[in-house]
Image (cartoon, rainbow, N blue to C red):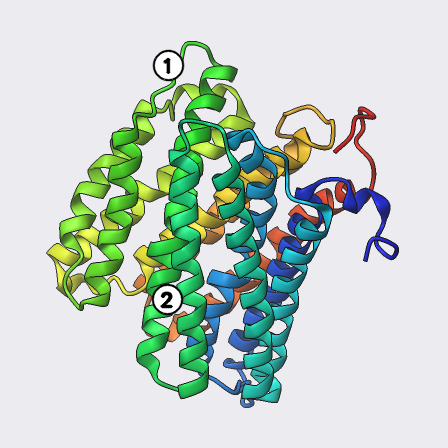
C-alpha cells in the first residue's frame, strides 16, 4: 500500500482516514439523493433491503467513524502520552472500513452476500480501531485516562452495534436493526462526540480567548454520557425517553452558555465548534416536546437535529481545524469555509423543518435537502482533499 499511495498521504494518521471519510460521505449522500429523487418519478430505485433501514446503517457507520479514526489516532496518543499507532495500523483500519462501506453500497444492488461481505470488512476495521485504542489506553502512563476510557467504552458499544447489524442482515429480523441503530447513535457516536467536546472545547476557548475560563468538570462528562446511554436504553426497552431528555436539554443549554457560545463569536473557527454544540439543546428540546406533547408528531426532526445539526456540522468544524493545523496553515476560518459551514446548518434546519411541512411536499423537500447536503460536502471536500496529498506548508513532519 505504501508504494502505491502518494507519500504525503502516509505521513500522519489523520490523512487517509479523513480523505476516506470525505469520499464516503460524498458517495453516501449521492446514493441517498439518487434514491430520494427516484421516488419523484415512475421508476423508484428498489434496494435489496428497505431504503430507510439501509440509510440508518450507512449514515451512522459509513461517515463519522472514519473521521473518528483519523482524530483518535492523532489526538489519542497525545492524550495518553504514548507512541502513535504504526503506519500499517493507521492505514489498514480506515481502509477496511471504507472497503466495507463500498461493499454495503454494492450489496444494495447485488444482494445479501455483498452486504455481509462488506459488513465483515467493516467489522474487521472497526475491531482494529477498538483494539488499537485499547492498547494505547493500556500502555498509557497517564494517571488520568478518563476521556480515553469513555471513548473506548463507546467503541465497544459501537462494535456491538456492528454485530447487531450482522444479525439483522443475516436473519432479516428487524429487532436487530433497532438494536444496531440505538447502539450506534446513543451508545457509540454521541458519547464519543460529547467526550471529545468536553476535552477540547473548553481548552480551545480558553486558549483563543483567555477571558473564557476553561470549565470541564468530570461530573459534566459523566452526566452527558450517562444521559445519552440512558436515552438509548429507554428506547431499546420501549419506554419514554423523557426521563433523560428534559435534564439533557437543560444541561446542554447551560453548558453551551457556560463554555462561551456568545464570546466565541469573536473567533470564527472557534465559534464553529460552539454553534455545532448548540444544536444539542435544540435536539433534546425537541425530544422533550415530543415526550410531553405526543400529539405534536415531531417525527424524525429531533433525530436529524442531532445527526445533521450536531454531528455533521461538528465534523466539518473539527476536521477543518485539525486539517489546517496539521497542514501547517493558520487556524483561521476562511470565507469559503465559513459559508460552507453555514450552508450545512441550513441543510440541517431544512431537514428538521421537513417533518412539519404538508405531506405533498415531503418527497421533494427530502430530495432537495439531500442534494444540498451533497453540494455542501462537495465544496468542503474540494478545498481540503488536496491538503492530504501534499506535505505540510511549514515543512514540518506530519
Front residue of 271/212: it is 212
Q: Residue 213 carries which label?
A: 1
Left or right for 142, reference 115: left
Front residue of 336/330: it is 330
Q: Is residue 215 above or below residue 240?
A: above
**Image quadrant assignment for residue 214:** top left
Taking the view exactly as shown, the residue that stands out farthest to the top is 211
**Image quadrant assignment for residue 291:** bottom left
Left or right for 387, reference 228: right
Instruction: Confirm whether residue 64 shows in the render.
Output: no
Instruction: Confirm whether residue 388 shows in the render.
Output: yes
Front residue of 298/62: it is 62
Question: Dot 2: within a 10 Å radius of its alpha carbon, few (fewer than 14), some, or many (20 or more) residues?
Answer: many
Left or right for 168, reference 127: left
Quadrant in which the C terminus appears: top right
Q: Is residue 270 above or below residue 349?
A: above
Q: In this view, does 235 lie above or below 269?
A: below
Find residue 374 and report its horizontal and vertical position in percent: 60, 59
Say which element carries label 2.
Answer: helix
Find residue 285 and report its horizontal and vertical position in percent: 23, 46
Find residue 397 and report its horizontal and vertical position in percent: 78, 30
Distance of mark 2 from mark 1, alpha carbons?
37 Å
Find residue 257 and report its horizontal and vertical position in percent: 31, 26
- The residue to which callout 2 is attached is 181
Residue shown at the point (43%, 47%) measured from the top left: 152
Amino acid at each position: 500500500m505504501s508504494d502505491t499511495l502518494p507519500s504525503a498521504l502516509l505521513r500522519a494518521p489523520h490523512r487517509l482516514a479523513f480523505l476516506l471519510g470525505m469520499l464516503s460521505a460524498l458517495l453516501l449522500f449521492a446514493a441517498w439523493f439518487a434514491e430520494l429523487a427516484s421516488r419523484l418519478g415512475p421508476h423508484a430505485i428498489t434496494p435489496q433491503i428497505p431504503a430507510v433501514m439501509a440509510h440508518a446503517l450507512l449514515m451512522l457507520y459509513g461517515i463519522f467513524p472514519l473521521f473518528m479514526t483519523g482524530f483518535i489516532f492523532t489526538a489519542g496518543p497525545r492524550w495518553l502520552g504514548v507512541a502513535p499507532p504504526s503506519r500499517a495500523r493507521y492505514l489498514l483500519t480506515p481502509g477496511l472500513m471504507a472497503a466495507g462501506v463500498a461493499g454495503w453500497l454494492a450489496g444494495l444492488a447485488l444482494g445479501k452476500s455483498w452486504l455481509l461481505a462488506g459488513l465483515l470488512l467493516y467489522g474487521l476495521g472497526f475491531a482494529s480501531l477498538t483494539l488499537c485504542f485499547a492498547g494505547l489506553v493500556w500502555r498509557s502512563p497517564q494517571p488520568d485516562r478518563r476521556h480515553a476510557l469513555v471513548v473506548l467504552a463507546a467503541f465497544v458499544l459501537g462494535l456491538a452495534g456492528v454485530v447487531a447489524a450482522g444479525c439483522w442482515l443475516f436473519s432479516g429480523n428487524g429487532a436487530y436493526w433497532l438494536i444496531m441503530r440505538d447502539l450506534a447513535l446513543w451508545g457509540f457516536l454521541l458519547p464519543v462526540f460529547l467526550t471529545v467536546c468536553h476535552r477540547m472545547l473548553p481548552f480551545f476557548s480558553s486558549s483563543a480567548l483567555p477571558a473564557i475560563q476553561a470549565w470541564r468538570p468530570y461530573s459534566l462528562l459523566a452526566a452527558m454520557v450517562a444521559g445519552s446511554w440512558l436515552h438509548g436504553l429507554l428506547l431499546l426497552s420501549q419506554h419514554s425517553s423523557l426521563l433523560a431528555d428534559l435534564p439533557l436539554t437543560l444541561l446542554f443549554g447551560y453548558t453551551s452558555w457556560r463554555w462561551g457560545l456568545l464570546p466565541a463569536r469573536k473567533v470564527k473557527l472557534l465559534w464553529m465548534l460552539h454553534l455545532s454544540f448548540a444544536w444539542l439543546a435544540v435536539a433534546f428540546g425537541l425530544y422533550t416536546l415530543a415526550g410531553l406533547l405526543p400529539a405534536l408528531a415531531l417525527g424524525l426532526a429531533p433525530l436529524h437535529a442531532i445527526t445533521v445539526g450536531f454531528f455533521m456540522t461538528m465534523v466539518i468544524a473539527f476536521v477543518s481545524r485539525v486539517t489546517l493545523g496539521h497542514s501547517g496553515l493558520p487556524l483561521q476560518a476562511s470565507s469559503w469555509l465559513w459559508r460552507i459551514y453555514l450552508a450545512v446548518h441550513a441543510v440541517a434546519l431544512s431537514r428538521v423543518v421537513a417533518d412539519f411541512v404538508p405531506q405533498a411536499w415531503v418527497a421533494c423537500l427530502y430530495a432537495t435537502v439531500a442534494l444540498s447536503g451533497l453540494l455542501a460536502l462537495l465544496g468542503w471536500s474540494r478545498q481540503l482533499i488536496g491538503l492530504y496529498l501534499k506535505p505540510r506548508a511549514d515543512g514540518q513532519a506530519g
